[in-house]
Image: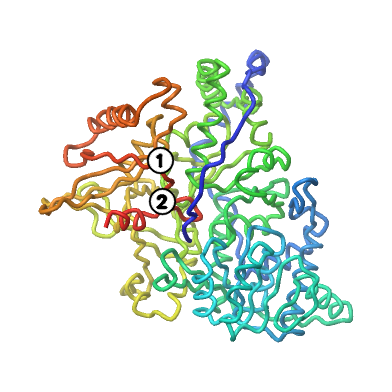
């Protein structure tokens, strides 16, 4: 993951909420016999997992899906902003993967070679990645936001023999081509260019591969996959000179699919909304491989500024997101409700529909139909991962009738290690260990908090060409089990649900040995309307050993204007926010209290999953 230097949350716009569907409450009929049965079974159902799948490789999933779901829609993508979304079937996708894989292996002799894939979420990215996983070579998904020198470093470090890139990365690739003599082929997506030196078009390979397949060549599909062979290399966050390369095998990825199958029920009727970057394992594993295994379709968002129209046009049922995105959807929708003067009514309806749901009557989709319409009308699951989220936001999602799930994992666990079971949701937790994983807390304190250790079938093979770094994070116990030191601090409740309270590397240690986790304070600050974004950190004092608990804040100027009036000076804004911080301080023990406020005018440096890059911001201080 890397910095999105100029990332800004899109200014979503939603129509007024009029709450026309309240009359539906009068139509509710309660079947008390059915209700009694539901209540008797509710406790048992909370601990009953769904049937587990047992895939060992992604090729197994691909082979099954291309036969079972051949004529179903697999992908929707808008290749031209002025046109409608185009539907691509499972058969069309599979044919392209087989043709592309055949050309790579038979025509261009790239079998088992390392192949970089770089570009925005688009059909050719999906085809490229699947071809690699099915035997064409070793995939190296790269963040499209990397600067050219770091892209060059990744290609060299991975010893890639080919680079598949989107048209938007053409200028960058041209710029560094001469510095990459070991790369035999540069393959441009959506290009029909014939082989010219080292350059060739993606569509040319598909045409060449299709001719081979049509003539009877089955070599690509005949490739046998070793589930435990190193097949994917993903570089983690940090500058490329010191970032770690995570080595992942087919079994790691297939176990993600198996893990989710016991906690969440998906069908061919489900449609995923792809908005997060595919080079990240969260999106490529849970947003691509998982839906394929269940016959779902995937709607590819055109970009952050198109989220709302794309949701409304494609009508997805499932969306993977990060907290910043969910929180902003929550704020924008609630602002339209406030402007319509319907806040009190919506809150009343939440209480009423919650009460009805508790006795087996669920009319939330009818009552909150206008809110659903803003999100496409069919959304039933929103998954939050990659960072902590305010439990209030998750509860609101549940309150309007959408299943709110949280996932937990890292690139090193490919990525899933814990997930909320949909039949036993617990808003605020990061989920429960999935069936192929076990979690434990290392050296817990009096509150039960300690470093989260993970044992999982999804755990990476190790760090690329760095045995020392691997040994630092993977501990082998007396039974030969591999335990990964996540670097996250958290605790487990009595049902095994995980709660993350901070990152070890972010911890601020006071002179008397107290630990302060910035994330805990940031969640409280995130509830303040006048604060758009913030980062808590320990600020050094000249001549002092003790750090000052400080916060950098980007004000929510629009909300400040609504609440406090126009034409405010910078000092006025500072004082308004400081008053809010003083209120938060009253909720904190004294050693955690914020002592210093800095108003930040430019955006925070962020990763592609929209997390603030703390080390970049702190280094600016230095």
The residue at which mark 2 appears reads as 612
Disc 2 residue crowd, few under 14, some 14–19, many 20+, Cα 10 Å:
some
Which is nearer the eye, 614 or 76?
614
Extreme residue in the right direction:
215
Residue 11 position (above or below residue 128): above
Q: Residue at x 34, y 31 (%)?
A: 570
Q: Quadrant of residue 391?
A: top left
Image quadrant in which the C terminus is located = bottom left
Task: Please name the colour scheme applied to the rendered image.
Answer: rainbow
Q: Position of residue 129 (x, y in %)?
A: 65, 68
Disc 1 residue crowd, few under 14, some 14–19, many 20+, Cα 10 Å:
some
Mark 2 or 1 closer to N-term? 1
Task: Kindly report the distance in space between the C-alpha atoms of the residues bearing marks 2 and 1.
Answer: 9 Å
Q: Position of residue 561 (x, y in %)?
A: 44, 24
* Residue at disc 2, secondary structure: loop
Which is nearer the eye, 483 or 385?
385
Residue 325 marker:
none
Mark 2 touches mark 1? (CB < 8 Å): yes
542 sits left or right of 432 in the view = left
Which is nearer the eye, 294 or 190?
190
Q: Quadrant of residue 305?
A: top right
The residue at which mark 1 appears reads as 533
Q: Position of residue 449 (x, y in %)?
A: 27, 51
Q: Quadrant of residue 98?
A: bottom right
167 sits left or right of 408 in the view = right
């Amino acid at each position: 993951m890397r910095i999105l230097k100029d990332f800004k949350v899109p200014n979503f716009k939603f129509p007024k909420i009029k709450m026309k569907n309240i009359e539906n409450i009068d139509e509710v009929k309660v079947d008390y016999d059915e209700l009694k049965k539901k209540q008797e079974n509710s406790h048992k159902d909370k601990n009953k997992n769904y049937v587990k799948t047992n895939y060992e490789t992604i090729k197994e999933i691909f082979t099954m899906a291309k036969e079972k779901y051949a004529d179903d829609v697999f992908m929707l993508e808008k290749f031209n902003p002025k046109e409608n979304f185009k539907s691509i079937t499972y058969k069309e996708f599979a044919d392209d993967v087989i043709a592309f894989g055949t050309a790579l292996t038979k025509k261009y002799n790239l079998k088992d070679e390392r192949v970089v894939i770089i570009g925005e979420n688009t059909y050719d990215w999906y085809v490229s990645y699947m071809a690699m996983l099915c035997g064409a070579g070793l995939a190296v998904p790269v963040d499209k936001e990397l600067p050219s020198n770091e892209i060059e470093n990744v290609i060299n470090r991975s010893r890639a023999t080919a680079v598949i890139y989107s048209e938007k990365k053409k200028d960058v690739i041209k710029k560094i081509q001469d510095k990459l003599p070991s790369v035999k082929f540069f393959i441009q997506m959506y290009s029909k260019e014939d082989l010219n030196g080292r350059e060739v078009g993606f569509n040319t390979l598909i045409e060449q591969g299709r001719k081979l397949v049509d003539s009877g060549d089955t070599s690509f599909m005949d490739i046998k996959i070793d589930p435990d062979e190193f097949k994917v290399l993903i570089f983690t966050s940090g500058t490329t000179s010191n970032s770690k390369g995570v080595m992942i095998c087919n079994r790691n990825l297939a176990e993600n699919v198996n893990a989710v199958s016991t906690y969440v029920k998906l069908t061919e009727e489900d449609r995923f909304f792809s908005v997060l970057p595919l080079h990240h394992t969260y999106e490529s594993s849970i947003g691509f491989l998982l839906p394929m295994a269940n016959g779902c379709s995937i709607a590819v968002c055109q970009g952050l500024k198109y989220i709302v129209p794309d949701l409304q046009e494609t009508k997805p049922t499932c969306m993977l997101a990060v907290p910043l995105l969910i929180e902003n959807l929550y704020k924008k929708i609630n602002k339209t409700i406030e402007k319509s003067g319907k806040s009190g009514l919506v809150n009343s309806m939440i209480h009423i529909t919650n009460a009805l749901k508790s006795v087996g009557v669920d009319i939330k989709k009818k009552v909150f139909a206008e809110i659903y319409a803003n999100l496409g009308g069919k959304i039933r699951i929103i998954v939050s991962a990659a960072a902590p989220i305010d439990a209030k936001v998750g509860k609101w999602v549940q309150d309007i009738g959408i299943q709110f799930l949280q996932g937990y994992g890292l690139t090193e666990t490919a990525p899933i290690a814990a997930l909320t079971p949909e039949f036993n949701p617990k808003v605020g937790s990061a989920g429960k260990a999935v069936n192929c994983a076990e979690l434990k807390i290392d050296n817990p304190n009096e509150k039960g908090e300690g470093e989260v250790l993970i044992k999982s079938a999804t755990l990476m093979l190790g760090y690329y060409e760095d045995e020392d770094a691997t040994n630092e994070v993977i501990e082998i116990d007396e039974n030969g089990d591999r335990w990964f030191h996540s670097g996250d601090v958290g605790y487990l409740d009595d049902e095994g649900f995980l709660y993350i309270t901070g990152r070890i590397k972010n911890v601020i240690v006071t002179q008397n040995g107290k630990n302060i986790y910035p994330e805990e304070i940031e969640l409280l600050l995130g509830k303040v309307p006048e604060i758009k974004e913030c980062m808590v950190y320990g600020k050094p004092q000249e001549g002092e050993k003790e750090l000052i608990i400080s916060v950098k804040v980007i004000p929510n100027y629009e909300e400040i204007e609504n609440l406090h009036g126009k034409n405010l000076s910078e000092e006025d804004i500072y004082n308004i926010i400081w008053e809010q911080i003083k209120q938060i301080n009253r909720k904190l023990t004294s050693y955690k209290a914020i002592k210093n406020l800095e108003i930040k005018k430019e955006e925070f440096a962020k990763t592609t999953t929209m997390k603030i890059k703390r080390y970049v911001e702190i280094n600016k201080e230095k």
